[in-house]
Amino acid sequence: MLVVHKYGGTSMGSVERIKSVAQRVAKWHRAGHRVVVVPSAMAGETNRLLGLAKEISAEADPRELDQIASTGEQVSVGLLAIALQALGVKAKSYTGWQAGIKTDSAFTKARITEIDGAKLLSDLDAGVIPIVTGFQGIDGAGNITTLGRGGSDTQAVAVAAAIKADECLIYTDVDAIYTTDPRVVEDARPLKVIAFEEMFELASLGSKVLQIRSVEFAGKYRVPTRVLSSFTDPLIPIEIEAKSGTLITFEEDEKMEQAVVSGIAFNRDEAKITLRGVPDMPGIAYKIVGPIGEANIDIDMIVQNIGESGHTDFSFTVHRNEFDRAMRVLNEQVKPALGAKEVVGDNRVCKVSIVGIGMRSHVGIAATMFKALADENINIQMITTSEIKTSVLVDDKYMELAVRALHRAFELDKEPAARAA
Ligand code: ADP
Ligand code: ASP
Ligand code: MG
């Protein structure tokens, strides 16, 4: 098989862990498989590097942030190459630019535009294991770029697509994709398979197990992608390892669980802003949302209340990092232009979402969700729905309570066949 192995920060977190990764990779190599490895920086390293920059300036040049953050992965690939060589296996490390990973110039959140897989394939032909830094590439002007936090997942899947790998194996610190984050809900259940569409929604709604763009790549290029543990014995038989964890599938087949709700995601990165007492007339939404868009701030959820005596309230959410900037735009531009009464902000909210392709064909799911939250006395501040998900915005002090209550209400700890609904 031709495979890409991706190892996350915790999996690369110490010299001991790196030696264990080397043993696992060498095992695949010796069994005759062709392996390209994409490791992350050692756990905590990216935060440490970005922290240094922040100590100097809160508004550092994004180009320089990428220059700095990209070095975490550069250390990892070198160490892993040495660990493999120490086991008597040929290995060679590359940074993103050395491996020919081209991106656009959106520093700190660049998108991969092109990968030349030829060099990696020629290494493999020569019996050498290529090790490529996660999370980074080079733009048209030769600047180093990074793909955003968690971006090593995307690097790995993109490399897998470029070399037409049989599978991309994402090794991490949990042994599967679960019904929700197993660190929040103890009885979260591991899934054998998950539909691409569901994983895509979960990742976009905040589930950090895979970066959203890695799921996008997997879908676009139909890369079979598996999430599994790097904490098992590195020498376990490949037949067992290759079937472990969770596979993202593109077809609904008989292996799919027939669940209505498959998973729960949550996202603490939200902030809510309300503009009170705006005139209720055509064009208002545009006049509020327009300047926010011009400031390059993404809006997520939106609610406009029914007007009363010619006025209305308009609320929306933005990423918590953009909260201050969005408040400034509203206070300085929008409020005076519209003659609105006041701007109120709350950056202690979070979004909790239920996801499942079974929601397409079932009614009453939202009612079950709202009742479970009401029973815990959790106030819902906003709601958005689409065909396969329902999201609510709640006070972030209730986040874990909400996730647990919903996990229980939809009986996600049980196999779908054993659920009441
Ligand atoms: P890595 O460093 O390997 O990329 P991450 O921390 O980015 O690891 O992602 C793995 C983490 O994702 C797990 O430790 C777990 O806490 C979290 N997580 C969130 N949602 C889920 C889920 N549905 N299933 C499994 N893990 C999840
Ligand atoms: N090291 C980068 C980060 O911490 C990329 C990754 O681990 O996926 O975000
Ligand atoms: Mg990650």
Image (tube, rainbow, N blue to C red):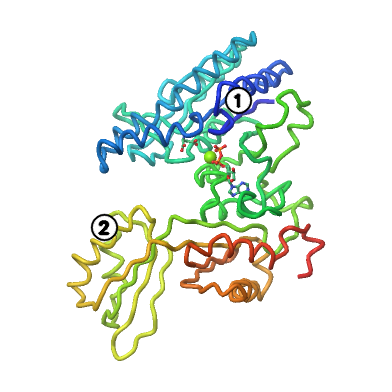
Tell me: is circle 2 under 8 Å from ligand 2. Answer: no
Image quarter (top left, top right, bottom left or bottom right) of the N terminus: top right
* Picture layout, residue 208 above or below residue 20: below
Q: Residue at x 67, y 35 (%)?
A: 229
Where, by quadrant of the figure, is residue 363 drawn?
Answer: bottom right
* Picture layout, residue 286 above or below residue 35: below
Residue in the foreground of this view, choosing between 126 and 15: 15
Residue 286 x/y as whole percent: 30, 70
* Picture layout, residue 67 above or below residue 418: above
Q: Is residue 215 left or right of residue 187?
A: left
Could you give the CA–CA distance between mark 1 and mark 2, rounded to whole angstroms? 45 Å
Name the outermost residue toward the bottom.
Answer: 309
Disc on res. 112: none
Image quarter (top left, top right, bottom left or bottom right) of the C terminus: bottom right
Q: Earlier in the sequence, mark 1 or mark 2?
A: 1
Residue 63 x/y as whole percent: 29, 34
Please name the amino acid that badge 2 sits on. Answer: Glu
Q: Residue at x 64, y 67 (%)?
A: 360
The residue tagged 2 is 294
Please name the amino acid that badge 1 sits on. Answer: Arg
Residue in the foreground of this view, choosing between 298 and 56: 56
Residue 81 x/y as whole percent: 54, 16
Q: Is residue 244 left or right of residue 155?
A: right
Q: Nearer the viewer, mark 1 or mark 2?
A: 1
The residue tagged 1 is 17
Local packing at callout 1 (Cα closer than 10 Å; few below 14, some 14-19, many 20+) is some
* Picture layout, residue 190 above or below residue 383: above
Where, by quadrant of the figure, is residue 107 drawn?
Answer: top left
Q: Is there a contact, CB below 8 Å, between mark 1 and mark 2?
A: no
Q: Is residue 61 left or right of residue 50?
A: left
Q: Secondary structure at mark 1?
A: helix
